[in-house]
Image: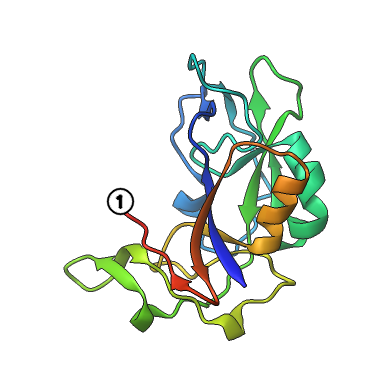
Amino acid sequence: MEVYEYRPADGFRPWERTDGSLARIRDDVPDGVSVAEGWVPPRGRLAPLPGRRRGDFPFAIDPTMSARAREVLDPLIGHCGEWLRVETEGEDEDAFVIFNVTTVVDCIDEPASEMLRFDDGRPYAATQLAFRPERLDPARPVFRTPEGVTTAFYMLGPVVERVAEAGLVGLGDRLRWDAEGGPRLFPF
């Protein structure tokens, strides 16, 4: 079993907000909580960066995906979160969406991980993450870990494989852990 961190690949245009807000879903919402009720779609655009391509995962402040990525991934991950609309200038109304991961799995093996910590002992980043394989469930292929350990969300191998099979572009393949080789070094 493999665990990947959701990150964009280099060389692709990010989705950036143009509505003046820098707020993120995770700024005000505890892990695992739906924000769909009362959701006000943020307004933004694909950043006009020369030399960068349009991708299916223009990660911005929140995990933004193309409508095509949603169509491909929804059968596999849709039950692990919620799709939230965004307004993208110069694009079709439904060109991009945010995926709010609401599945939380307490699966990090902290003693076997290497964490960077605040003075009070709370972790703020991990250079190497170890996962408890008995807590990883293929039925929950996309998940977050409890607050305080890391703010990322993670994908199991089948999600990354489906992205490749469908020809989706722009998703970085940051392998953080696998059952055979253990944690992977994550330099900052």
Q: Secondary structure at mark 1?
A: loop
Most extreme residue toward the left is: 119
Give the answer, above or below, for where 171 lies relative to 80. Answer: above
Q: Is residue 127 left or right of residue 151?
A: left
In the image, residue 102 above or below residue 8: below
Q: Is residue 20 left or right of residue 70?
A: left
- Residue position marked by numbered label 1 in the rendering: 188
Image location of residue 5, percent across then percent down:
52, 56
Q: Point out residue 50 in the picture as x, y percentages from the top left corner.
A: 49, 14
The quarter holding residue 65 reads: top right
How many residues crowd mark 1 within 10 Å: few (<14), some (14–19), many (20+)? few
From what the image shows, is residue 60 above or below residue 181?
above
- Residue at 53 percent across and 76 percent down: it is 180
Q: What percent of the width, then of the height, locates residue 66?
A: 70, 35
Could you tell me which residue is drawn at 57 percent across and 81 percent down? 133
Q: Residue at x 31, y 71 (%)?
A: 114
